[in-house]
Amino acid sequence: MDQRVIGRLGQQVSVVGLGTWQLGADWGDIDDKDALTVLEAAAEAGVTFFDTADVYGDGRSEQTIAAFLRARPDLQVLVATKMGRRVEQIPQNYVLDNFRAWNDRSRRNLGVDRIDLVQLHCPPTPVYSSDEVFDALDTLVDEGRVAAYGVSVETAAEALTAIARPNVASVQIIFNPFRMKPLREVLPAAEKAGVGIIARVPLASGLLSGRYTKDTVFAADDHRTFNRHGEAFDQGETFSGVDFEAGVEAAAEFSALAPEGYTPAQSALRWIIQQPGVSTVIPGARSPEQVRANAAAAELAPLSDATLTAIQDLYDRRIKDQVERRW
């Protein structure tokens, strides 16, 4: 699989990575054996970037990755985790003592002395403007706890504030054919600054797979049931902030644009991959088949200009007004 450098981190990763939120929680239950099977399929497909967080299953996702990598010492996988969502979301909690405590816990979960990449996990907006916060992150690097740090953001404005910081290695942002705003400012600014872009929620929580109808029912413990209106966390994390019923209609139109030999999900991933400035895209997966199909998107030919124009038109007509005013 093609490899790209994650910005100031200076390390290469597969252009299609693996998001592991679903291996911890909030997507319905998955047992440990199935989770390990997903990781194995990703490694076999050439995936060399796993993204996790300390709150995914309250550490279960980190621990599962650690168990898998202990059994596969032959693999070279860059593991990124996130921190900050285990406490009340107020700026005053984003201080060095807490960073050290959160980092200690993640290093134990991951079974490592130093984490490859740690990211602030969508903190309150004022955090991005705090010199003290980024001084504290620099201290984690100086102490050898992390190799580099980045941020995971909700809005384009937060991303631009973070990119201006001299030692931010990467910005993780929701980016897909139903969330195009980062194309205009965030990706160009990141590329100019040498900051990596990690594209998350690439399938709009599965909408862009084209598999759902307006009658689809998700499990009660799936965020696609309990967070549709932002009840538990930012609404933009669920279906990219798109209304579900309207999203199903738009996804049907998107599916019809998939070139021959591409699934709708692969079309979405291919669209992301070919945008300048993207370092890696991190779809989640609950089965080996999903992992292999996602990874295969990296080997497909780029979408044609005609297809790109049609996708842009779909976004402008059906999606833009729903999401750009908020994120």
Image (cartoon, rainbow, N blue to C red):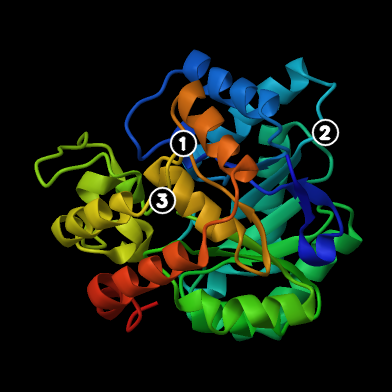
Q: In this view, does 62 lie to the left or right of 103?
A: left
Determine if residue 277 is in view: yes
Q: What element carries label 3?
A: loop
Quadrant in the picture for the N terminus: top right
Rendering coords of residue 167 (x, y %)? 80, 74
Up-down relation of residue 264 to residue 296 (above or below): below
Q: What element carries label 1?
A: helix
Residue under pointer 3? 203
Residue at (71, 32) in percent of width and height: 46
Rendering coords of residue 6 (x, y %)? 76, 59
Q: Is residue 240 left or right of residue 287?
A: left
Up-down relation of residue 112 to residue 16 (above or below): above
Which is closer to the viewer, label 3 or label 2? 3
Question: Going from the N terminus, do you reach mark 2 or mark 1 first?
Answer: 1
Q: Are circles 3 and 2 on residues that touch, CB within 8 Å?
A: no
Query: What amino acid is found at the position of numbered circle 1 in the picture?
Result: Gly
Residue under pointer 1? 57
Report the front residue among 297 and 91. 297
Residue under pointer 2? 76
